[in-house]
Amino acid sequence: MSAFIVSAGVLLEVGAPSTLTRSTESRAAFTGTIGGKRKGFIRRGGRREWALDVSIARPGMVSTIETIARNGGPVGWYGSDATIGNLLSPQASGFDVPQFNATDAGLVQLPDGTIARAVVLTGAVSIGTAHGSFEAVPVVPGSRITVSGWGLGGLRFTGTWRDQTYATTGFLSGTTFTHNGWGFASQTFTVPATASALSIVVQGATQVARPAIAWGASARDELGTGCPVAVIHGATHAPITLMGAANYSKTSYQVTEVG
């Protein structure tokens, strides 16, 4: 599956890497005291890095990667792990940052046996405030997109369709689901012709956990792996001699989450 970037609101395909390795910076630091005790300092939401390799890169891909790396400015990064999964960032889908109208409920065990961070709703909650007042994921006009999540007692999704400048072009209004306890809800929508991005709001539940937005008609119940703000850098190219007229390279590059 290809990786994509979002530059100036435009979704651009980078190409499919041969390997992708994702790591998260340490969120914990420890120090010793004179008395022999150890103190720990923990912060939420460690930023991530990706290391990508393309075993045999054609000249077009080499040019694409080199151009992006030389661009210097931040872009949205949606690697192969995000484009087949949850496009939201882990900060958004994991409620790392306190949300308006929401109170941290800590970790909960969901009926499928998994653990997620939940929030108690006191009103409608806009998903994703780690990088601004909302988090908008890229969408393709005319395609299908599926919104999902866990709700205690019920759940309803609403949202805003946005253009390349993230200005409002329309509104998404979903079905109201009712659950006896925790329940999983998902709904598929067709992207309007004028939309380039989608931000969502959850409501109609006592608590909510692990919201997700996925390309296609299938729900992806997993922590998000999208990245609204990243820098692509460290491109290296090692030419490979396959045939006289070809110019293939073994290419690698790095992506670092910022913001």
Image (tube, rainbow, N blue to C red):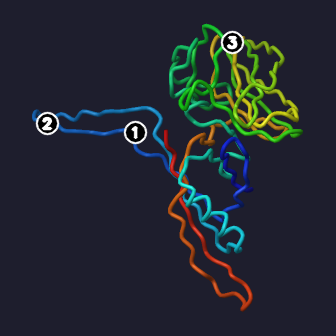
Q: Look at 55% across and 26% down and name the residue there.
A: 117
| Residue 245 circle label | none
SS of the residue at dot 1?
Answer: loop
Q: Quadrant of the N terminus?
A: bottom right
* Of marks 2 and 3, the one in the foreground: 3
Q: Quadrant of residue 251?
A: bottom right
Depth check: give the residue in front, 124 or 39.
124
> Residue 110, image x and y in percent?
64, 25
Read off the residue under disc 1. Answer: 27
Q: Residue at x 64, y 8 (%)?
A: 123
Tag 2, which secondary structure? loop
Kind of residue sitting beneath label 3: Ala
Question: Left or right: where does residue 53 sit relative to residue 45?
Answer: right
Give the residue type that dot 2 points to.
Answer: Gly
Residue 216, image x, y percentages = 83, 40
Tell me: residue 250, above or below residue 169.
below
Tag nearer the camera, 2 or 1: 1
Q: Residue drawn at (60%, 46%), measured in percent from left and top?
A: 75
Bin the neighbour count of mark 1 within 10 Å (Cα to Cα): few under 14, some 14-19, many 20 and up: few
| Type of amino acid at the residue the image marks with label 1 | Arg
Q: Which residue is mark 3?
A: 205
How many angstroms separate mark 1 from mark 3 (CA)? 31 Å
- Label 3 crowding class (10 Å Cα cut-off): few <14, some 14-19, many 20+? many
Q: CA distance from mark 2 to mark 1?
A: 23 Å
From the image, tell me which residue sits under label 2.
36
Mark 2 or mark 3, earlier in chain? 2
Residue 39 position, x and y percent, is: 24, 33
Image quadrant in which you'd find residue 19: bottom right
Pinpoint residue 89: horizontal percent, then vertical percent. 60, 37
The answer to which quarter of the image holds residue 155 is top right
Compare marks 1 and 3 and give the one earlier in the sequence.
Answer: 1
